[in-house]
Image (cartoon, helix red, strand yellow):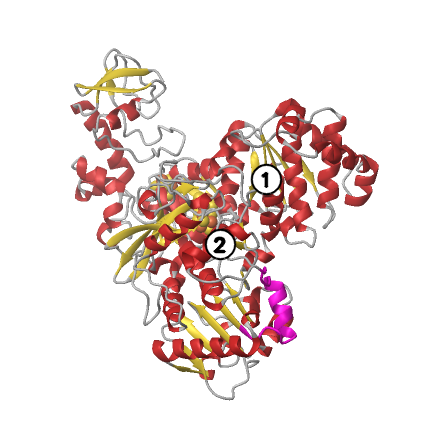
Amino acid sequence: MKEIQLSIDGKKVKVADGSTVLDAIWKADIYVPTLCHDPSLEPYGGCRLCIVQIMGMRGLPTSCTTPAQEGMVVFTETEELQRVRRTIVELAICNHPNECLSCSKNQECELLKIANYLGIRQSSLEDMRRRKQARAQDTSNPAFDFDPEKCVLCGKCVRTCNEIVRVGAIDFAYRGYNTTVSTFSSQPLVLSACQSCGECADRCPTGALVNKDVRPHEKEVKTVCPYCGVGCPIILGVSNKRVVRVRGDGEAAVNQGELCVKGRYGIDFINHPDRLIRPLIRKENIPKERGRVGPLDVFREADWDEALERIAQTLSATIDHHGTDAVGLLSSAKCTNEDNYIFQKFARASLGTNNVDHCARLCHASTVAAALAAFGDGAMSNSISDIDEAEVMLVIGSNTTECHPIIGRKIKRAIKERGAQLIVADPRSIELTEMSEIHLNHLPGTDVALLNGIMQEIVKEGLHDQTFMSERCEGYEDFLESLERYDLKTVEAATGVSREKIHRSALLFAKDHKRAIVFYGMGITQHTTGTDNVKAIANLLMLTGNLGRRGTGFSPLRGQNNVQGACDMGALPNVYPGYQRVDDPAVKAKFEKSWGKHLSKKAGLTVTDMFRAAHEQRLKALYVMGENPALSEPDSDHARAALSKLDFLVVQDIFLTETAQMADLVLPAAGFAEKDGTFTNTERRVQLLRKALESPGQARADWQIITHLSSRMGYSMSYTSSAEIMAEIASLTPIYGGIHHDRLSESGLQWPCRDREVP
Ligand code: SF4
Ligand code: SF4
Ligand code: SF4
């Protein structure tokens, strides 16, 4: 890129052509005050504090909106500039409440910083003050408050809500002397369209928009949000052994510092007084159906020694009497990769069973199965950043703005900022349908017919990518033939979608070989035909050559924070880590050699099979780590009945969940902020989790609990850190071959990453 040179206060500085004068000032490491500027927002020039003098140019232009030009000579701190800035700040501050010491923004207030820089004192402003405070605070939002008296009308909040979040919940109102930031119709924030994401409060330079209950932090620790598969890095502010604040990480590749309401305000569970702090053993003769009534009084506290010994003896006795396959294990998409690796290793090498599965069975196991069949890898084919280059997006079975909000925002911005086009296929109207070109509100359960109908139209119009298919696809002639049954009349009758809409969708998706991405979620995977639904998406992308290029791709939106990682780690009954099949003799031999144990070649039971087997009393013992099937199974009555029939149920968790309330033994685990390790997000990005706090009471990291138990059962597993576990994962899992903790400190690594040389 072409560079240009400027002089800033006599300092020579080079910037890329297209930069602003403010960019050049920052590059020269010179301070100029700004209230309204934010690099993630469009330049605004509203506060006028970044004014400069430029040789040969009249007036005092705002540096944030002035393009830098070759040879410019810029001055940032002349007497005239400071005098004008002082007046601007005095006017902004004259009606500001005189309560800086008690303001929650406190030392982070940009206005206070600028006032100090310009030497302005509150006492000198008394004559300019309005006599009484006229505008009431809005404290209706559970997460943050708005105090209009502290607002300097910089517009950052309004622009953030419009440009970044794309919600437009707030705007300037009552123009003139009474101008203020307001919701539509001046409703309280909590009743407005506001989504409580807190992006505005995060950027507000004063104490006008501030989070509730703010306390200063002693240290900050960078880790990863524990909610959804987007996997946004977060920075935890910690004080006095508590998380007191969460903010985004502006350097992060995934979210560039943005967060949704869950990541920013939903982390307080970690400090909750109901956290499990000691092992619990069910008292004698208390039936397991007594789940919810007085849950704690059915247990007595125990120490780790007694609890682990009880589990070791009972599991050993169960295996002795009923065989290894009488034991089942549920792993966790909320736990780290290292926890999941150790858990499945415990199942396979220590207990001798492949009966290990997790909640992916009920959400995206269909993705894993279909993507392995279609592409050979069970994951997203592209990266989240490909949204920035897509020309068309099809969203099917995903309420993206609710379930994956940061990806939802990127989709909205692609439409608004670049004119990308959107097709939404969903029986319901969702937020994204408002921005879509076409809403295909097909009948539930008709996804395959709809997608095949669109593909048939693409072929009929000659819009398929013959070169891509000839060079890269197998069996496509048979596939094209199979589409012939999906004529418009048949598909319209099956799906309830008009033939005109199906035809238009085909043209929009495939005409002119546009770059296209398909996003999908559990609206299509949680079906009896989930695998077929996903295969239809894979077919659509192969038919149109929308794979392996920027701005294209196959994009399953994984639900839980580490459901991708739990699958990658082999917490599935038919595969070892890295989707290596348990019935492949060479693979089995490799793991037997590494783990020093004979392993079963028989695929284990899935979650659904385990519950059926428990109901029929073929499964005698179940070990659940960080899952809550009594609540989350589709037929929870069936699940509870099955759990109550088990001879032995162990639950390892951070709270006494509905499932834990039915357990014989409950073990207290560390939460995400209390351990090191990794999560893998929906775009296959392995990111570091860092310990910010000690666990409460006697809670321990999941992998530590399992290794202690395994050693008691005669199969020694000894690791000094989660990094050491990742080294073992890398040695056995080709797609993770180059992934080591010491390489993950920046933005993590996306698999496949086969060795240390692969970036
Ligand atoms: S509330 Fe804060 S961000 Fe919004 S206009 Fe006022 S000072 Fe600026
Ligand atoms: S919290 Fe989010 S949605 Fe609500 S006004 Fe602020 S930026 Fe807009
Ligand atoms: S989008 Fe997902 S990962 Fe990001 S902050 Fe929200 S819940 Fe957390």
Where does residue 350 sit, x and y in percent of width and height? Answer: 45, 67
Q: Quadrant of residue 381?
A: top right
According to the picture, the residue beneath numbered tag 1 turns out to be: 375
Magenta-colored stretch includes residue 611: yes
Amino acid carrying mark 1 in the image: Phe
Q: Quadrant of the N terminus?
A: top left
Magenta-colored stretch includes residue 460: no
Label for residue 589? 2
| Residue 9 placement, left or right of 473 | left
| Residue 638 placement, left or right of 206 | right
Which secondary structure, mark 2? helix
Q: Which residue appears at 51% of the width and 29% of the height?
A: 550
Task: Please tell me whether mark 1 or mark 2 is closer to you in this view.
Answer: 2
Residue count near mark 2 (Cα–Cα under 10 Å), binned few <14, some 14–19, many ≥20? some
Where does residue 512 sit, x and y in percent of width and height? Answer: 64, 22
Residue 418 position (above or below residue 440):
above
